[in-house]
Amino acid sequence: MIWFRFLRKMSFLKMRTLGYASFFFVFGVALLMYLVEPETFGSYFRAVYWTMTTVVTVGYGDFFPNTDFGRMMTIFVFIFGIGIVGSLISKLVDGVQVIRDQKERGLLQVKESGHTIVFGYSRRSKHVIEELLETTDVILVDDLEREPFSHERFHYVNGDPALASTLQRANVKQAARAIVLADHSMPPALADGRTLLIASSIERANPDIYTIVEMMLEEHLDSFEQIKVDEVILGDETISRMAILASHHPGVTKVVTNLLTKHGDGMFSIPVRPEWTTYREAFHAMLEEGVTILSDGKRLDLNRRLDETIPPGSLLIVLCGEETAKRIGAF
């Protein structure tokens, strides 16, 4: 009866209290055993070793007490030591399980920095996440009951993406970029309203974050520009325009498709080099390296503005192979 009462009290103790109790019990018993039977153990470390193997019920038998007092202490260790240390181990295991459960349910605080936050989970966003995981940590924000999959660089945050508390758990202030994809299960106007609300919350929490949003209706572009999102992707209207291009200009969409896939050359960004003053200088320098400059990130008519001065801090969008991109420092 006393044993069960003792175990019950142990189960209600805090982890820190159990840790201190286990520490003093093991090292206290080891000191006492070494003082009583120094010939048996030879050193204090061996007495600690014997005490540890006893309380965790391993009992190798390489050391054992030879006096009656030592045997009485062994019985004492069995009765109380196993209860104290066993309770500590049980709480440690339970703690690990609680943390794992909270992680799967998206309740933990994200500690990463320089990560990408993706809002909303779907077949489309899953593809985006899988691509991003090759180069960066990804945080998914959604209201799913459990994280959709497990990956060492993937973390899930459960909650309303427009709430400051949810964004704080996703560590939005330390994030490098945010991607808000439209909810295609909603009417286009409502989907854009939801995206706009999330984007404005992100910009308030971290004005320096690079925000990419998907917009369903082009007439909402002014609203997104007012909250200063960095890039807006047209959703369904882009598909419609691609279909019109394919019908009027055969082969154009194949070029676009190739640019968006991993086959052949791709689009990359490069910083403007100090020796470039005009776009003409940049064009000639890149052509020597087998690279084509497509845009300054805003317009596609650089070939008609070759003698214009490149604004400081500009990024140029170029077309080249992946190996060439690495060589010229593109990203």
Image (tube, rainbow, N blue to C red):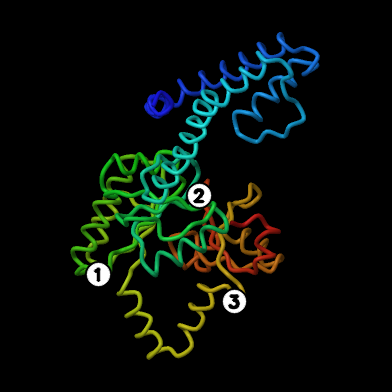
Q: Position of residue 228 (x, y in %)?
A: 32, 49
Q: Which residue is mark 1?
A: 185
Q: Is residue 111 visible?
A: yes
Q: Position of residue 154 (x, y in %)?
A: 48, 53
**Spatial CA span between label 2 and label 1:** 42 Å
As helix, strand or loop, the secondary structure at mark 2 comes to loop
Q: Nearer the viewer, residue 184 or 126?
A: 126
The quadrant holding residue 68 is top right
Looking at the rendered structure, the number of numbered marks drawn on it comes to 3
As helix, strand or loop, the secondary structure at mark 3 comes to loop
- Badge 2, how many Cα within 10 Å: few under 14, some, many 20+? few
| Residue located 53% across and 54% down the image | 315
Q: Is residue 14 visible?
A: no
Q: Nearer the viewer, mark 2 or mark 1?
A: 1
| Residue located 65% across and 13% down the image | 69
Q: Amino acid at mark 2?
A: Pro
Q: Is residue 121 above or below residue 313?
A: below
Q: Are marks 2 and 3 in contact (CB under 8 Å)?
A: no
Q: Nearer the viewer, mark 3 or mark 1?
A: 1
Tell me which label, 2 or 1, sits earlier in the chain. 1
Q: Which mark is residue 311?
A: 2
Tell me which label, 3 or 1, sits earlier in the chain. 1
Q: Are marks 2 and 1 in contact (CB under 8 Å)?
A: no
Q: Which residue is mark 3?
A: 263
Q: Position of residue 59 (x, y in %)?
A: 68, 33
**Spatial CA span between label 3 and label 1:** 31 Å
